[in-house]
Amino acid sequence: MEETTGKTTIAPSVLHTIAKLTTLATPGVSRLSSREGLSNVPEDGVKVIVRGDSIEVELYIIPGSEENVRLVAQTVQKRVTRAITEMVGMEVARIDVHITDIDLEAKV
């Protein structure tokens, strides 16, 4: 069998989608923050930065009111790291989770 050499490039939008969908599927996360009233928040609550072979992610989330916020944030970090590593094989250098509000009406 012949070995093929070359380069595989992962579009930042793919990493963005993985981070977004994984975050939304995490128990305790009601939704991602929007830019409404928060000028420093990305439009859909997700920011992905690719630096060489590693990735940095910033997530702006709104957990439900019945949730342990610290535990939800840690779970998001673990799940997004695992998803990116397993799906695209890239190293995750950092995942910052920003809690911008609490959803008092959420049934998460």
Image (spheres, helix red, strand yellow):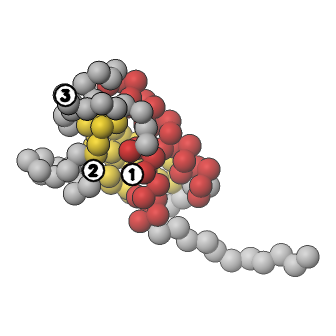
Point out the tag, 1 or 3, that comes first from the N-terminus: 1
Which SS class for mark 2?
A: loop
Which SS class for mark 3?
A: loop
Instruction: Examine the image and state in which quarter residue 1 appears.
Output: bottom right
Determine the residue located farthest toward the right in the rendered image: 1
Residue drawn at x 34%, y 36% is 29
Residue type for callout 3 = Leu
Which of the image's four quarters has the C terminus? top left
Q: Position of residue 34 (x, y in %)?
A: 20, 50
Mark 1 vs mark 3: in front: 3
The answer to whether residue 85 shows anywhere in this view is yes
Determine the residue located farthest toward the left in the rendered image: 37
Which SS class for mark 1?
A: helix
Classed neighbour count for the residue bearing mark 3: other residues with Cα under 10 Å, few (<14), some (14–19), many (≥20): few
Q: Is residue 10 above or below residue 93?
A: below
Instruction: Examine the image and state in which quarter residue 48 appears.
Output: bottom left
Is 83 positioned to the left or the right of 13 in the image?
Answer: right
Q: Pointer 2: what residue?
A: 45
Give the CA separation, mark 1 to mark 2. Answer: 8 Å
Tell which of 83 and 67 is nearer to you. 67
Tell which of 32 and 53 is nearer to you. 32
The reply to whether discs 3 and 2 touch (Cβ–Cβ < 8 Å) is: no
The answer to whether residue 98 shows anywhere in this view is no
Q: Position of residue 63 (x, y in %)?
A: 29, 32
Residue type for callout 1 = Lys
The reply to whether discs 1 and 2 touch (Cβ–Cβ < 8 Å) is: yes
Residue drawn at x 48%, y 44% is 80
Q: Position of residue 28 (x, y in %)?
A: 36, 31
- The mark found on residue 104 in the picture is 3
